[in-house]
Amino acid sequence: MSAHVLVINAGSSSLKYSLVEAASGEAAASGLVERIGEERSHHVHSGPKGEYDDERPIANHEAALEAAVQAFETQGPALADVDIVAVGHRVVHGGDRFAAPALVDDELIAAVTDLVPLAPLHNPANLEGIEVARRLLPDLPHVAVFDTAFHQTLPPYAYTYAVPSEWLASYGIRRYGFHGTSHSFVSEQAAKLLGRDPSEVNVIVLHLGNGCSAAAIRGGRSVDTSMGLTPLEGLVMGTRSGDLDPAIHGHLARVAGWSAEETDRALNSESGLKGITGANDFREVSRRRAAGDEQAQLGFDIYCHRIKKYIGAYYAVLGTVDAIVFTAGVGQHSSEVRAAALHNLTALGIHLDLDRNANPAQSKGFVSTDDSPVAVLVIPTNEEWQIARQAVAVIRAS
C-alpha cells in the first residue's frame, strides 16, 4: 500500500486539506472549508465518489476538520482504508529557528508561538490547525513544514537590512522570505527538465499568484528572495504593494494622521493590483485591460516592470543563469505577463518563443527557443506534494 500524507493548511477562517501519495504526488482527495465561524460556511470535497459541496454553519477549525473527516467517509477514500504515515502542516513563519521541516511536539509548538509577532495573521491560524489535528488524529505523527525554511540558506549580506544591528538581536528584523515550499519544489523540477542535478543549476523562480515572490537559487540553495520580514516586500501582488519607500509610513502619519496599523492594513489589503485597478484578481485585470481600461493597463505595466527588475537583479546576483521559471496561477497561465516581463532581455541570453509561450504544455514547459542560452520554463507548483515528501523524510529520519 502506498504511503499517504494528509496535508493541512489552516488559515484564519479556512481549512484546506489534501490526501497526497508521497511517491507520486497524486491527490486521492482534497477539500476546502471556507468562512469558518460564519453563518454560511462553505465546504467542498473532491474524492473518488465525486464532489461534495455544502453550505452550513461550521463554528471553528475543529468542526471544520471533523467535517473533512466525515467527507472522507462519505465521498472517499475512507481514511481507515488508506496508509496514512503522517499529517503535514504548512506553517508560514519559522523565523531563524527552523531551516528544515520538523516533527511536531510541545517544544515546536512553543517555538512557533514565540514567532507569532513575526506573522500575527498566519502563525496563530497554523497553530490552531496543528492543535486541532493533533486532538482528532492523535495516533499519527505530525510534521510542520515552514514557508521560510528554504530561504535560511541566504547569506548574511542578503538577509541583513541596513538598520541598527540591535534590531535583529532584539526584534528579529531581517529578511526571511516566503513561498519556500514552492520555490524548492519548482527549482527541483526545473533541474529535472534540464536533465541536470539541482546542485549544478542556477535558476530564477518567479512565483506569481495573488501573492508574488522571486528567488535566486544557486545549486539548489536560495541565495536571495524578494519577500522580507513579512510577505509585503518585493513584487507587486494582488493586494500588497511590494517594494516602496519606507518613509511613506511616516509621511502618511504626518499628513493624513494615519496610525501604523491603518497604513499596514492598506499596504497589505488595499494596494497592489487592487489599489491601482480596483481588482486583485489578475483575470479581471486582464479582462479590463483587453477592453481598453487605462488603469488596468497601468497595473499590468507596473506588475511586469517590477518582475523584469528582479530578473535583472537576480541575474547579477547569480552571475550565470540556466533557467528562468514561471509558476503559480499567473506565472503558469498568463503568456502576456511572461512576454512582457522578458521583453528586450535577449542581451541576457533570454530568447522567448512566442508560439511555445502561448501553449507551454505542447513543449513540456519550455517556452524559450531551442538555441536560447537561458531556458525559460513554465512549471506548475505543487506545494502539497512537497509538504508530503518532506513529511515522509522527517518521519523516516526520526
Image (cartoon, grey):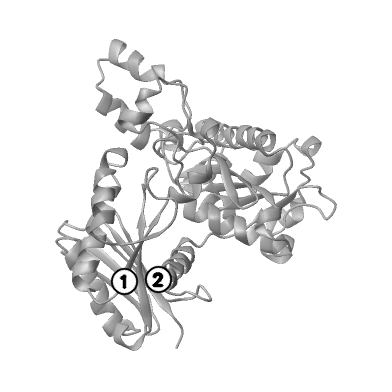
Q: Residue at x 33, y 15 (%)?
A: 250
Circle 2 packing at 10 Å, graded few (<14), some (14-19), many (20+), is some
Circle 1 packing at 10 Å, graded few (<14), some (14-19), many (20+), is some
In the picture of the structure, the residue carrying the numbered disc 1 is 141
Q: Secondary structure at mark 1?
A: loop
Q: Which numbered disc, 2 or 1, marks the residue that appears first in the sequence?
A: 1
In the picture of the structure, the residue carrying the numbered disc 2 is 395
Q: Are marks 2 and 1 in contact (CB under 8 Å)?
A: yes
Q: Position of residue 140 (x, y in %)?
A: 29, 75
Q: Position of residue 372 (x, y in %)?
A: 81, 49
Dot 1 amino acid type = Pro
Is residue 47 shown above or below 228?
below
Q: Position of residue 120 (x, y in %)?
A: 27, 41
Seen in the image, is 14 located left or right of residue 90? left
Q: Residue at x 83, y 55 (%)?
A: 370
Nearer to me, 264 or 138:
138
Q: Position of residue 295 (x, y in %)?
A: 50, 31
Dot 2 amino acid type = Ile
